[in-house]
Image: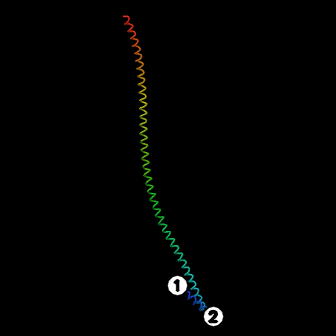
Amino acid sequence: MKSRPREFERNKTTDVRQELSSAKSNGSNKQIETLQKELSQITAMKEAEVGIGNLQEVLTFVKKHLEDAEGNKKRLTNDLESYQRRIAIADTSIETLSSRLNAAQTERDSLNKEMTAKLDEMTNQKENSSAQFNSIITILEGDLLESRQMEERLVSAMKIWRAIMQRH
């Protein structure tokens, strides 16, 4: 389609130039002026066609880049949504782990309190047992001392009684 108009324009340009040459030789100023205007219009149309062709190439180039950019935008949007989902999952995991950690720390604190209470109780029992043991030892030592003293008195009394029995 484009070859016909260009060929037509090329032929028309050639025709107008021939007419212009002929008009210059015949000396008709008005006809020369009209032909020069027509030749200028044809040249302007050719330049406009070249400009339109260039603009169409630029437009095609820009369209291609816009399509590429749209594709990149969709890919980046999908990537962003994927990362946001991953972040939400990670946030949930962090919350779960944090909750578990808090529960474990609470249980540890409770066990520490319980063990401290048992240790205090055992220490008190030990101290009480030691005091009771020391008290029993003191009592036993006292009893032992008393029993030795009684034994000594008894031995002494038996010696006296033997001595009395031997005299009689």
Q: How is the image coloured?
A: rainbow
Determine the residue positioned at 63% across, 94% down: 25
Q: Residue at the far front: name it.
A: 166
Q: Nearer the viewer, mark 2 or mark 1?
A: 1
Determine the residue positioned at 52% across, 84% down: 3
Q: Residue at the far top: name it.
A: 168
Q: Position of residue 108 (x, y in %)?
A: 43, 43
Q: Position of residue 136 (x, y in %)?
A: 41, 25
Density class for disc 1 (Cα within 10 Å; few <14, some 14-19, many ≥20) is few
What's under tag 1, amino acid-wise? Ser
Q: Earlier in the sequence, mark 2 or mark 1?
A: 1
Quick one: SS at disc 1? Answer: helix
Residue 40 quadrant: bottom right
Density class for disc 2 (Cα within 10 Å; few <14, some 14-19, many ≥20) is few
What's under tag 2, amino acid-wise? Ser
Q: Position of residue 11 (x, y in %)?
A: 56, 88
Residue 160 quadrant: top left
Count of numbered marks: 2
The residue identified by callout 1 is 3
Q: Quadrant of the C terminus?
A: top left
Residue 164 vs residue 69, the one in the foreground: 164
Q: Position of residue 148 (x, y in %)?
A: 41, 17
Where is 152 relative to 32, above or below?
A: above
Quick one: SS at disc 2? Answer: helix
Where is 124 relative to 75, above or below?
A: above
Where is 98 relative to 38, above or below?
A: above
Give the label on residue 126, or none: none
Give the label on residue 25, or none: 2
Q: Residue at the far bottom: name it.
A: 26
Determine the residue positioned at 58% across, 87% down: 39
